[in-house]
Image (cartoon, grey):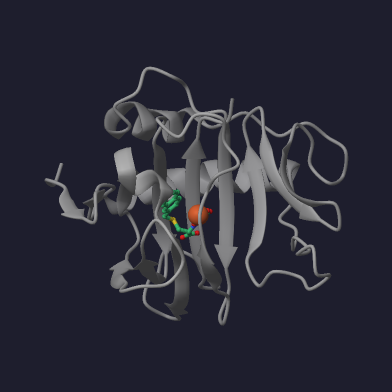
Amino acid sequence: RPAPQEIRGFLHYPGWLDVAEQQALLADLREVVARAPLFSPMTPYGKPMSVRMTSAGRFGWVSDRRGYRYSETHPDGCPWPEIPSSILAIWNAVSGTTRAPECCLINFYGEGAKMGMHQDRDEDDFDQPVVSISLGDDGLFRIGNATRGGKTESLWLRSGDVMVMGGAARLLYHGIDRIKPGTCPLMPKGGRINLTLRVVT
Ligand code: MD3
Ligand code: FE
């Protein structure tokens, strides 16, 4: 496996997954999405997000007019599917914690989708890391600071990359500015998938 590169306290493992592993992960994700379909979360302002989402695990992330929150059910009322063992294996290899992830958020970025700068602070224990896995088209990831504004750094996340956000990096502002369509042949219709694994409670 490649050695990690450190950027603002994030550990970036470029090319952690080979193409066969990426394809196996995608096959597992297709089963998750068949049982828990992607949806466009509504922001509390009533505007749909450009990223489509679903989740696996005990908790999933939902957003509607009541606000953003973790929920034990999909908007259709069903419990979320289990996190596939192929994804748990990546968490076990890189997270550095003995806790198991309770949420695997699946973000799908079609052409033009982006995610504004935000912090992830809806979890109970910020000492637990977040692990991110990228599949499909390249995404331009931007990292900021512990408060809004200030200087930022950007890096392209590519299919098969894994990132670990622990320590002080866990609470940095971050977002996805854009994806570069047509940069990865993994998915026939293109697009980018990002998985984020989190301990919630
Ligand atoms: C830094 N997702 O789902 S992954 C998110 O590519 C999210 O879909 C982006 O930000 C995406 O919340 C970025 C990298 C990432 C994920 C979670 C983090 C960076 C993080 C949590 C804390 C700090
Ligand atoms: Fe985030």
Q: Position of residue 117 (x, y in %)?
A: 50, 67
Give the answer, above or below, for where 177 lies relative to 36: below
Picture residue at 37% right of the left edge, 69% below the top: 142
Picture residue at 58% right of the left edge, 75% below the top: 113
Image quadrant in which the N terminus is located? top left
Picture residue at 56% right of the left edge, 80% below the top: 111
Give the answer, above or below, for where 143 lies relative to 162: below
Q: Position of residue 32 (x, y in %)?
A: 64, 41
Question: Quarter-wise, where is residue 73 in the image?
Answer: top right
Q: Nearer the viewer, residue 159 or 102?
A: 102
Q: Is residue 170 left or right of residue 108?
A: left
Is residue 160 something that shows in the picture? Answer: yes
Count of numbered tags:
0
Q: Position of residue 15 (x, y in %)?
A: 23, 54
Farthest residue to the top: give it. Answer: 98
Q: Position of residue 104 (x, y in %)?
A: 55, 39
Farthest residue to the left: give it. Answer: 3
Q: Is residue 103 left or right of residue 44?
A: left
Give the answer, above or below, for where 15 lies relative to 71: below
Q: Is residue 59 left or right of residue 113?
A: right
Is residue 21 something that shows in the picture? Answer: no
Give the answer, above or below, for where 127 lies relative to 184: above
Picture residue at 42% right of the left edge, 30% below the top: 128
Image quadrant in which the C terminus is located? top right
